[in-house]
Image (spheres, helix red, strand yellow):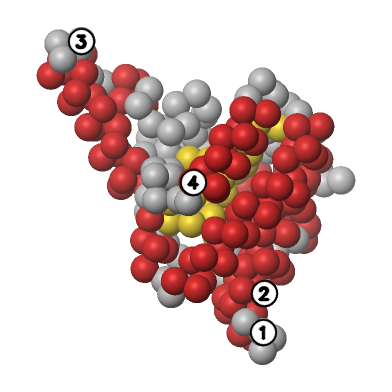
Amino acid sequence: MIDISKDELPQHIAIIMDGNGRWAKKRGLTRSVGHRAGMEKIREITQLCSDFGIKILTIYAFSCQNWKRPRREVNFLMSGFKRYLDKEKDDLNKKGTRFRVIGRRRRLSSSLQNKIEEVMSLTKDNKDFFLNLAIDYGGQEEIIDAAKALIKEVVRGNLAVEEIDMDLFRQYLYLKDLPSPDLLIRTGGEYRVSNFLLWHIAYTELWMTPVFWPDFGKKEFLMALKDYAKRERRFGKIREE
């Protein structure tokens, strides 16, 4: 399919799927149409990852700050997440995908929370592919929640402050059992990480594209993989001569 060895491919890709609203506006459509197209795109990109042997995909679907958007748009997005889960749950399980939602989630409706729990429970033993959807998620919020949990352990006498290091801190994060993303893709032309996976992307390679998320397809996906394969990941070490 492409002339890249398996060792040169990322094993964990994170995506900020930006540009749904602008994609719709450009076509004279409502923002809701753009969001619907964006949800449909998740299936395509999940399949592309699987086709290339990429085992983990984490997608930024709704941030803690997105609650500030118009109520009508927020309601549409929430109902869209539920429709997505209803539509995809059996296929995800059939393909051996473990599905998880990361984020605070407490502000989600009870019906959406129940649906999330249903799909997570259905797929919890799957190991062929890992799909993480970040809903009501913020990177700063994740770090704060982890810090609070650690403080509680110290106060209860279960943990000494001196025992806290990066490995222990990671155990209180949402993706504690998965490796950090190798590649972060952002669509829509913006050049920022928008409070996404802040702890996890310390050494992640970034790839930005002006293409709106609903238009992001195999062509752009391959461009990202080829660019990633050319990079030398040093993790603080000097460049190899």
Going by the numbered disc 4, the residue's amino acid type is: Ser
Q: Which residue is mark 1?
A: 29
Q: Secondary structure at mark 4?
A: helix
Query: Could you tell whether 123 is left or right of 61 in the image?
Result: right
Q: Which residue is mark 4?
A: 110
* Residue at (73, 59) in percent of width and height: 40
Pick the front one: 153 or 2? 153
Pick the front one: 203 or 110? 110
Q: Which residue is mark 3?
A: 158
* Residue at (45, 50) in percent of width and height: 108
Cβ atoms under marks 1 and 3 closer than 8 Å:
no
Cβ atoms under marks 1 and 2 closer than 8 Å:
yes
Marks 3 and 4, Cα distance to the nearest angstrom? 33 Å
Outermost residue on the bottom side: it is 28
Question: Dot 2: within a 10 Å radius of its alpha carbon, few (fewer than 14), some, or many (20 or more) residues?
Answer: some
Q: Position of residue 63 (x, y in %)?
A: 43, 56
Residue 58 seen: no
Question: Dot 1: within a 10 Å radius of its alpha carbon, few (fewer than 14), some, or many (20 or more) residues?
Answer: few
Marks 3 and 2, Cα distance to the nearest angstrom? 50 Å
Going by the numbered disc 3, the residue's amino acid type is: Asn
Instruction: Give the mark nearer the N terminus: 4 vs 2.
Output: 2
Query: Could you tell whether 43 is left or right of 191 in the image?
Result: right
Pick the front one: 30 or 52? 30
Going by the numbered disc 1, the residue's amino acid type is: Leu
Marks 1 and 4, Cα distance to the nearest angstrom? 30 Å
Residue 33, numbered label: 2
Tell me the mark number nearer the camera, choosing from 1 and 4.
4
